[in-house]
Amino acid sequence: QVQLEESGGGLVQAGGSLRLSCAASGSIFSMNVMAWYRQAPGKQRELVAGVTSGGSVNYADSVKGRFTISRDNAKKTVYLQMNSLKPEDTAVYYCNVQFLRSDRASYWGQGTQVTVSS
């Protein structure tokens, strides 16, 4: 069983920064993608950024140049550094890990609230 524990959300003023962390525990398949998604009220969950076990990254256009995803494989942890935050970044942020194997097993964290005030 895989568990993901997120931390680092909170309330910040526009232009500020936050750093989210997500620590995985349990049996983690070595080839995987760790990612951050977000869901704002009344909207669908969307991918924010992802990083593979090999280090390849991708970002949503809306956060490019402002957010940075990174991972520490030894700690089984993924981070999301969020700078120049905007009110439209307000959402619940979810951590996800997907195994790159035939069953595509996927696990979610419980979510952490990020609120950006104007």
Image: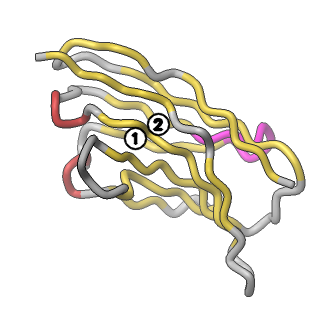
C-alpha span from label 2 to label 1: 6 Å
Q: Which residue is mark 2?
A: 80
Left or right: 89 as drawn, with respect to 109: left
Q: Please state the horizontal and vertical placement of residue 45, each as a whole percent of the image.
A: 37, 55
User: Which part of the image, by quadrant, shows the C terminus?
Assistant: top left
Q: Image check: 37 left or right of 39? A: right
Q: Position of residue 106 (x, y in %)?
A: 66, 65
Q: Are marks 2 and 1 in contact (CB under 8 Å)?
A: yes
| Residue 9 located left or right of residue 26 | left
Classify mark 1: helix, strand or loop: strand
Direction bottom: furthest residue: 102
The stretch of residues the image draws in magenta is: 72-78
Q: Is residue 94 left or right of residue 91?
A: right
Q: Nearer the viewer, residue 91 or 23?
A: 91
Residue 53 appears in the rendering? no
Quadrant location of the N terminus in the rendered image: bottom right
